[in-house]
Amino acid sequence: MLNIVTYTSLVKGLCNLGRWSDAAGLLSHFIKREISPNVITSTALVDAFVKNGKVLEAKELYEEMIRMSIEPDIVTYSSLINGLCMQDRVDEASEMFGLMVRRGCFPDVVSYNTLINGFCKAKRVEDGMRLFREMSQRGLVSSTVTYNTLIQGFFEAGDVDMAQEVFRQMDSPDIWTYNILLGGLCDNGEVEKALVMFEDLQKSEMELDIVTYTTIIHGMCKSANSSTFSGDGITGTLPSTPN
C-alpha cells in the first residue's frame, strides 16, 4: 500500500524530471485519497512551479499548505522569494520574507542573499544594504555571495565608492569578486584603477581565469584610449579552454 513516504518520493522524482504537471496531479490524487502531504512533498512542488515560472501556482500551493496545517519551512519560503524576485516582484518578495519571520521561520543566509539579489536587480541596492546590516544584527555571517551581490549592485548603480567600501569589509574575496571589481571599475570609467588592481592580482597567488583577462581587455578597449593599452599590464598565460 502506498504511503506518504512513497508519494513524496514519486512527487520529488517527477519534479526532478521537470514533470511538474504530473507531480501536481499526483499531489491532488493523494489529497483526494485523504493522504495528507508533508512539507517535503509540498515544497518540492512549490520549487518546481517556481522553476517553471509558475509563481501564481506556487503561491496557491503555499496557501493550501497553510489551510492544511502544513507549516512551510525555510526551503519553501526561499523558493517563493526567489520566484517573486525573478519576476521583478521584489515588494511581494519582501512581504513574503516578513511573513516568514512572523510565522516563526527565521531566514538563513540563503534567504537573505536571495532577497538582497532581488533588490540589487531592481536597482534598490540601499534596501539590499539594509538587509546586509540586519543579517549582522541577527548573528548571521555574510557569505562571499552576499558581498559579491552588493558590490555588483553598487557598481550597476554607479556608486563606485560604496562598491569598494563593501569590498574592503570582505575577509576572503574570490576570483569572482575581483572579476566584478574589474568590470565595475571599467564600466564606471575607472580603467586606470582596474589596471592597477589587475597588475596586483598578477603578482598575487590568486589564480586568474579567462573572465579576468576578457574583462580587463574589454574595459581597456571600451575606454577608447589606445595609449593606455601598451600591453605591459597584460602578461602571463591565459587559462586553457577545452577544445
Image (cartoon, rainbow, N blue to C red):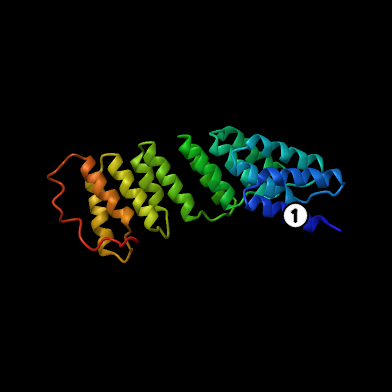
Q: Quadrant of residue 186?
A: top left
**Circle 1 — which element?**
helix
Q: Residue at x 72, y 51 (%)?
A: 11
The mark total stands at: 1
Q: Nearer the viewer, residue 236 or 146?
A: 236
Image x and y of residue 124, in percent? 47, 35
The amino acid marked with disc number 1 is Thr
Q: Nearer the viewer, residue 234 or 205?
A: 234
Q: Give the left or right position of residue 42, taking residue 165 as reference.
A: right
Image x and y of residue 38, in percent? 78, 51
Q: Quadrant of residue 226?
A: top left
Q: Quadrant of residue 57?
A: top right
Relative to 116, does residue 207 appear above or below in the rendering?
A: below
For label 1, the residue is 8
Q: Nearer the viewer, residue 17 or 158?
A: 17
Q: Residue at x 57, y 52 (%)?
A: 109
**Residue 105 visible, this angle:** no
Q: Residue at x 28, y 59 (%)?
A: 201
Q: Give the left or right position of residue 28, taking residue 129 as reference.
A: right
The quarter of the picture where the C terminus appears is bottom left
Q: Give the left or right position of residue 166, taking residue 42 as reference.
A: left
Q: Give the left or right position of residue 172, taking residue 7 as reference.
A: left
Image x and y of residue 230, in percent? 13, 51
Count neighbours of disc 1 (C-alpha within 10 A) and say few if under 14, some if 14 to 19, many if 20 or more.
many
**Residue 142 visible, this angle:** yes
The residue positioned farthest toward the bottom in the image shown: 205
The quarter of the picture where the N terminus appears is bottom right
Q: Nearer the viewer, residue 165 or 61?
A: 61
Relative to 144, does residue 87 appear above or below in the rendering?
A: above
Image x and y of residue 182, in percent? 31, 49
